[in-house]
Image (tube, helix red, strand yellow):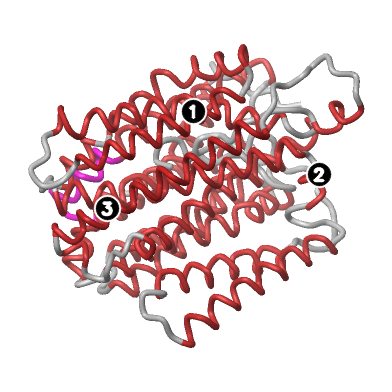
């Protein structure tokens, strides 16, 4: 049994290590958006290159995060965590010295691989190391520090972009890694899941899943120039998706066992997750550009302007979770997306000459209240919709669904909104397309709200029916940080909080 106490020196070192490691991945998910205009200008990159700067990272992270957790369980969580931190730092260094957009995109994809190795291990190390009496408090402190990181991420990113330059958004990870790795090797005990077994990992399933996402993403980003190559790529992506489902159905030890979707509640909440995080992914990608390209903010100004949403999440998420426990998840998961949709429609007022307090702040406050209302209950409902023994698997699948939704949204939204390759260089053209994009995001959120209203039900803990005991009832997907796949340790995580 784990016996490290939080108050001990070793406990504090373990907490520091996990916070540092997860902060590297979390910061890069929140600060890059505010750097995109400067990256495009310095590297002479079009909008598609900026989309890939975001999506290359999300693609490999979403496709490999379940496999990364499995590797940690099998070969040692500390070992895989350290490898992930070093890999992430090396890829970050390559991002920071990238001479052109192509190298930057490739380095971002490598960053995602490192993130898939270190992210699941962060909470897994807490779960495996601390005494059960201290584990809850340790996770709470880890989450709190992660929330602070999410809150200051856009601010730090803007300061770096306007100060030493956008390359330091990535180079900052190198000293963090140099601090994290020695502490991990010296103070964090090794652990593994003794029950992990089997002759193989589901590498084929992971590869097919990542290939399907990559091909579809490429087709969506390049669809503005309709060609045979784009059509072939799209068809190949769909075929890879079908093959992924077939492989997962036939494998004896699949990465994503399809029978988990026998829980109607789990399936329904994941549909809500897809809608909600698609809208969030599209919004945060375009909002940072809108504030800089159209409104005229600096990178620091844009990052600071977006802080209210994160501040509300930090202040009110715990109370939202308590409210969801009292009244059930159906109302929060119905009302929350509608509030977010209203916030995005209020962003239609944010154009050239917009002022912060009367135009921008109200939209962000309404959006933040919507996020507070839905995110905590969403995570709880995912975890509660399956048997306790499969909670980690449910969390990992939901995390992958959220990241995949953001990935597809960043690829598809500019196309749907009619945003040309050079739109971000023209304030007028970008403003018009941004307005159409916000309407689309609001519509997707309304769909998510309707799905929640029609399908999500309050847990019935006293239910005696077999299906209640089999499928549980309601749960929610963690902010950037609490999921695991078949091999991810309980509590292993991701921290997608308000960086979304």
Q: Is residue 165 found inside the magenta-colored segment of the image?
A: yes
Q: Residue at x 78, y 45 (%)?
A: 260
Q: Residues within 10 Å of mark 3 (few under 14, many from 20)?
A: many
Residue at which label 1 appears: 143
**Which quarter of the figure is the C terminus placed in?**
top left
345 sits left or right of 275 in the view: left
Identify which residue, 56 or 458, lies in the foreground: 458
Tally the numbered discs: 3
Lower sequence index among marks 1 and 2? 1
Q: Residues within 10 Å of mark 1 (few under 14, many from 20)?
A: many
Q: Residue furthest left?
A: 353
The label nearer to you, 3 versus 2, is 3
Real-space Cα separation, disc 3 to disc 1, in angstroms: 33 Å
Q: Residue at x 17, y 33 (%)?
A: 359
Q: Magenta region: which residues?
A: 154-169
In the image, is residue 235 above or below residue 417? below
Residue at which label 3 appears: 434
Quarter residue 23 falls in: top left
Real-space Cα separation, disc 1 to disc 2, in angstroms: 31 Å
Q: Position of residue 38 (x, y in %)?
A: 18, 59
Q: Position of residue 441 (x, y in %)?
A: 40, 47
Numbered label attached to residue 202: none
């Amino acid at each position: 049994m784990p016996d490290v106490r939080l108050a001990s020196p070793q406990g504090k070192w373990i907490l520091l290590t996990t916070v540092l490691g997860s902060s590297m991945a979390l910061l890069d998910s929140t600060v890059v958006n505010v750097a995109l205009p400067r990256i495009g200008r310095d590297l002479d990159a079009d909008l598609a290159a900026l989309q890939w700067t975001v999506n290359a990272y999300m693609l490999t992270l979403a496709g490999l995060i379940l496999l990364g957790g499995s590797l940690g369980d099998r070969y040692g969580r500390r070992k895989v965590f350290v490898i992930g931190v070093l890999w992430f730092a090396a890829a970050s260094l390559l991002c920071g010295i990238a001479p052109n957009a192509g190298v930057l995109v490739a380095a971002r994809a490598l960053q995602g691989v490192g993130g898939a190795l270190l992210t699941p291990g962060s909470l897994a190390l807490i779960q495996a190391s601390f005494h059960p009496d201290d584990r809850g408090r340790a996770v709470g402190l880890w989450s709190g520090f992660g929330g602070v990181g999410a809150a200051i991420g856009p601010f730090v990113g803007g300061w770096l972009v306007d100060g030493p330059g956008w390359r330091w958004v990535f180079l900052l990870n190198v000293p963090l890694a140099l601090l994290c790795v020695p502490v991990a090797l010296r103070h964090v005990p090794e652990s593994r899941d003794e029950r992990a077994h089997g002759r193989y990992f589901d590498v084929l399933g992971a590869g097919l899943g990542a290939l399907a996402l990559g091909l579809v993403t490429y087709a969506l980003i390049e669809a503005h120039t309709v060609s045979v190559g784009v059509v072939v790529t799209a068809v190949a992506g769909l075929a890879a998706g079908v093959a992924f489902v077939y492989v997962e159905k036939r494998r004896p030890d699949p990465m994503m066992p399809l029978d988990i979707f026998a829980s109607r509640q789990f399936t329904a909440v994941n549909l809500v997750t897809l809608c909600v995080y698609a809208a969030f992914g599209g919004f945060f990608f375009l909002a940072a550009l809108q504030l800089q390209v159209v409104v005229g903010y600096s990178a620091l100004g844009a990052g600071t302007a977006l802080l209210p949403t994160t501040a509300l999440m930090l202040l009110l998420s715990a109370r939202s979770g308590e409210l969801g426990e009292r009244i059930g998840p159906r109302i929060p998961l119905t009302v929350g997306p509608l509030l977010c949709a209203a916030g995005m429609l209020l962003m239609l007022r944010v154009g050239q000459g917009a002022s912060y307090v009367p135009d921008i702040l109200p939209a962000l406050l309404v959006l933040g209240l919507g996020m507070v209302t839905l995110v905590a209950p969403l995570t709880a409902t995912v975890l509660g919709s399956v048997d306790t023994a499969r909670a980690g698997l449910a969390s990992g699948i939901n995390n992958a669904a959220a990241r995949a939704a953001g990935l597809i949204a960043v690829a598809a939204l500019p196309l749907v909104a009619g945003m040309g390759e050079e739109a971000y260089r023209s304030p007028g053209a970008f403003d018009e397309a941004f307005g159409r994009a916000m309407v689309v995001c609001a519509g997707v959120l309304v769909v998510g709200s309707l799905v929640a209203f029609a399908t999500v039900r309050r847990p019935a803990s006293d239910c005696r029916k077999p299906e209640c005991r089999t499928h549980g009832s309601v749960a929610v997907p963690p902010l950037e940080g609490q999921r695991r796949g078949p091999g991810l340790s309980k509590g292993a995580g991701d921290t997608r909080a308000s960086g979304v």
